[in-house]
Amino acid sequence: MSSGKDFAEGSSSSPSDHQHQQPATPSRYESQKRRDWNTFGQYLKNQRPPVPLSQCNCNHVLDFLRYLDQFGKTKVHLQGCMFYGQPEPPAPCTCPLRQAWGSLDALIGRLRAAYEENGGPPEMNPFATGAIRVYLREVREFQAKARGIPYKKKKKKTDQSTKEDEDHPSSAAHFA
């Protein structure tokens, strides 16, 4: 694990340390996490004035997510568009391309893990704040409405009724 000093400077431990801790070929997830972490670090460095990683907060993360929209590939219809609410529109339109909700959600998960792996304290993790969860929920709901796809929260199945029937098999027969 990196020290707090490493985190504040935005660097990690020496390459020789990693040879003992990680496999020679990182997984796809680990490679993507490292790329995402480096991209976010570069984004902070490009801010005017540059933002040190140790001073990053959820507002910087939200700005980063909005910045990424310009590179999105998912058509998100605006409310005035004649195709708003249609999952498969019959013709092209001028609505913007955005980052898909699922991509943003996965990105935040990787950055949340990378923050702590690079020495950031879990209680200060800007990727794990309520503001980020709210933003992602709003993006999901907006994109679902724009594309006409209902997102319904799945209810957990309760086995309580079947368990009661198993525990007291004759009770159901009395009232039949």
Image: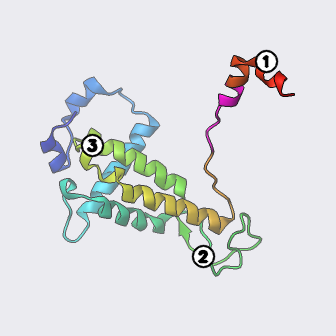
Q: Residue at x 38, y 44 (%)?
A: 33
Q: Is residue 158 visible?
A: yes
From the image, tell me which residue sits under label 1: 170
Q: Quadrant of residue 170?
A: top right
Q: Earlier in the sequence, mark 3 or mark 1?
A: 3
| Helix, strand or loop at mark 3 | helix
Q: Residues within 10 Å of mark 2 (few under 14, many from 20)?
A: some
Classify the position of the N terminus by image quarter: top left
Q: Which residues are magenta?
A: 155-163
The amino acid beneath tag 2 is Leu
Q: Residues within 10 Å of mark 1 (few under 14, many from 20)?
A: few
- C-alpha span from label 3 to label 1: 53 Å
Q: Residues within 10 Å of mark 3 (few under 14, many from 20)?
A: some
Q: Residue at x 51, y 53 (%)?
A: 103
Q: Residue at x 34, y 60 (%)?
A: 61
Badge number at residue 77 = none
Q: Position of residue 30 (x, y in %)?
A: 39, 38
Residue at the far bottom: name it: 80
Badge number at residue 78 = 2
Q: Earlier in the sequence, mark 3 or mark 2?
A: 2
Asked if marks 3 and 2 touch (Cβ < 8 Å), the reply is no
The amino acid beneath tag 1 is Ser
